[in-house]
Amino acid sequence: MSPLPHWLILIAAVLSIVGDALAGPETAPLVTRNATVQVEYANPASVGTPVAVETSIPAPILPSSAPIPPQAQVPPKQSWCPSEVFCAGQLLQTVNLAQPFSDSKTFVDKPTVHNEVTTVSDFNAIFDGGLTVGAVTNYVNLNFQGEGLELEAVSIPSNRTPAFLLNEATIPSPIVRGWASIVNGYWNTLVRETNQSRLCPDTSSGCESSLIPLNHTFVVPGGRFREQYYWDSFWIMEGLLVSELYDIAKSGLLNFMDEIERFGFIPNGGRIYYLNRSQPPIFIKMLSRYVNVTSDTSILPRALPLAEAELVWWQTNRTISVKSPYTGKTYPVSHYAAINTAPRPESYLEDYRTVNGVPLSAGSSATDLNGLTYTERQRADMYSEIASGAETGWDYTSRFAKDPFATLTNTTNQEPLMRGLNVRATVAVDLNSIIYDAMIQLANLYSVSIRTTKSLSKRAESRDKRIMHATLANQHRANAALRKAAILDLMWDPEKMAFYDFNLTSNARNGFFSAAHFYPMWNGIWPEEVTRGGKHAEAVARKMFAPVGLVLSRYNGTFPATFLKTGAQWDAPNAWPPHQYIIIQALANVPSKLSTQPYPALDSSKTSFSLVPANQLGLSESQLPLQPLVSGQNSSLDINYNAGTWTTGGTAQSGETWSRALLRGMANRYSTGGSIPGLLNQLTPQELNVTFSTPDSTGHMYEKFNVFDIDSAGSGGEYTVQAGFGWTNGAALWVAANYGAILDRPECPAIEIAPAPVVKRSLGSKVTRFNGRRTKHHDGRYTVERTREVNKWR
């Protein structure tokens, strides 16, 4: 089988995948190159052969002879991270100021060559002898191994095809089914296990590593995220379940259970520098999904007590009481609040610069280091806010900033936003919705356990366990009801018809709209205005989803995290796979009695923005991002709406109600490209050259995408856009398996070639070079003009 070029797809608005090669002349999308990427290659033609784990060598941006810039005071040691090498201290700070790698995470993921004592001693020798960039670079080369060497890729058998790919009724389009088959093969590039032969021994004579070894197989997100991550794993599991890789899905759960036993909670990721924070607590939902899909209840005897332990950790460490300014009632609610007084090791330089200013060039005095005058307490608070922001999973966003507009005038400088984070004083609506659902799902799992033990045994101890489980189930349902009441009281705005975070600083709702609005509906929480019924209930439900219609109508991409363009990666224009999944699930959860009318027809007098309740978005229409046009102008119009459907929004169905129309639109906003054996031919080498592509590439799935362009990856944040990508693959496969029947074959823009006359030479050999100029139209269509130059060798 010939190598596949890049396969581009954004499915369910989840996935705008940017690649390096285009499909045949009839279906040729654009290749965009607006970001540097770290790539893990996946060749579906060779599924079953695991990829190699790549490593980096130092490539400092400063001259080797340059002295290390003046340093701010080294922050205190963190009790949760005691390593002298990989945690806060002089060694970590000095190496980061030398900037041997473009990504701070690279260094802390490299195991040492020697034990900690020798590693620190070798550092002290260069520290005492005069620090230069070259000295630090040599030190890193001599004392550290390649990042990720403690992990090894695992091969998945290539003869397993899940049922949804075998049934044409599930995915009628051969193109979509062929694409889903390729993505299904990408799991083979992301499955890992601990490499016991390279694992640093826990002895004084061995090396040291930041890795938290895991006992079972797991799936990594990809790119720089080379270990298991907490909330990523939910969407990874959704993909594994439809791919019928049940053993790998279970292994991931077992790893999380091991971590709860060892640490009392599930860390952000599988490194020791994540041990001061978790991520959105979605383990119980994962456990419930696994049991419901597989009917494997054998995991429950061990899992249920550990699920209880995780809830206790959140209740003990992340739960506070808040008195409602609206009703006077007091509720237990949760917030993100990491304990931290130092830069995050994996983003040390970024945090150091935020709090201390940018290190200046050699020759600057310590007093010139920055113009900041923060006290030690203020610096500690900032470090805690930054770590808490990472715990949200939304690292970072104006949603959690004291001033959401702080970086609008200069999106390249994130420091004003980062210095003004207010995460710990924010009661996040998504977090509390997840915890509400965790209580409901845990109660339901106890009910499953009761039925299972009752059928297996009638012994007294089994009866006692059933009684205990029934008691716990009732307690969790009661706690869930209280948490639901808190969400509806503190976070639901009946005038704006949306959910918002509650701000402890102002003692009021934030009024800042984000994709977090959809989390309550995803988890089955609806306001009284909807649940009590009546003639206005459907209108309220429709207005809750009005922003979805706005995005489908006004923009060429998919739903953004927020509508503010700040430069932060969890703001516009970036759109994230989990949010698209959640919005689709929320739309699917709309009760049928509340969706009886069609989606309103739009025209010049009734626009998608006019359907949005007043002040729901917290922005005026003129403050919304504008859709760029090929003319160089921008549009604020509903350019993608047309007779009941949207550009790249699928085919309108007969009798389709508003919620089903929006769901269908979201599920169809995708772009495809590349080639599929027997279905799509690869472009010619000349055409690949025009589109800046290469024939040997095999495709990328990116972690984030773009509201303006389904052909474009996301951007911004602390690191370059990552390829892989676990939750992207999982969300895409979930959409294909559940909504493949309504997915249209994508209508990709054609490449139009206008060849220039060939200048013939009578002497010497000739070499042909093709040059291309691409023009994109507002509907996503590209016109490419090609010129050809023929030169002779001399």
Image: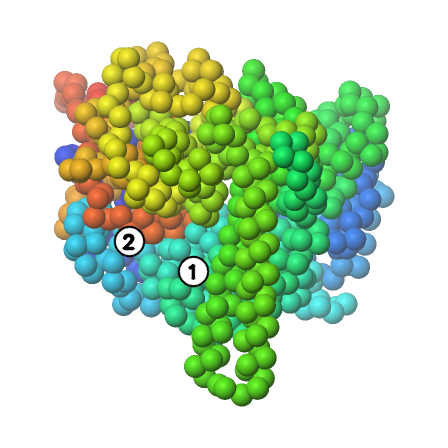
Name the colouring of the figure.
Answer: rainbow
**Residue at 66 percent of width and 47 percent of height:** 332
89 shown above or below 459: above
Q: Is residue 593 left or right of residue 190?
A: left
Residue 75 seen anywhere in this rendered image of the structure: yes
- Return the disc, 1 or 2, that comes first in the chain's sequence: 1
Mark 1, Cα crowd under 10 Å, few <14 / some 14-19 / many 20+, is: some
Residue 364 seen anywhere in this rendered image of the structure: no
**Residue at 71 percent of width and 48 percent of height:** 139
Residue beneath disc 2: 737
**Residue at 48 percent of width and 20 percent of height:** 615
Q: Is residue 599 left or right of residue 626?
A: left
* Kind of residue sitting beneath label 2: Ala
Of residues 597 and 678, the one nearer the viewer is 597
Label 1 vs label 2, nearer the camera:
1
Total tally of numbered discs in the picture: 2
Residue 67 quadrant: top right
**Residue at 56 percent of width and 44 percent of height:** 485
x and y, in percent, of residue 94 in the image: 75, 40
Which structural element holds mark 1?
Answer: helix
Which quadrant: the N terminus? Answer: bottom left
x and y, in percent, of residue 566 in the image: 54, 24
Which structural element holds mark 2?
Answer: helix
Identify the mark at residue 289; answer none if there is no mark.
1
Alpha carbon distance from label 1 to label 2: 15 Å
* Kind of residue sitting beneath label 1: Arg
Of residues 693 and 161, the one nearer the viewer is 161
Of residues 252 and 153, the one nearer the viewer is 252
Residue 488 quadrant: top right
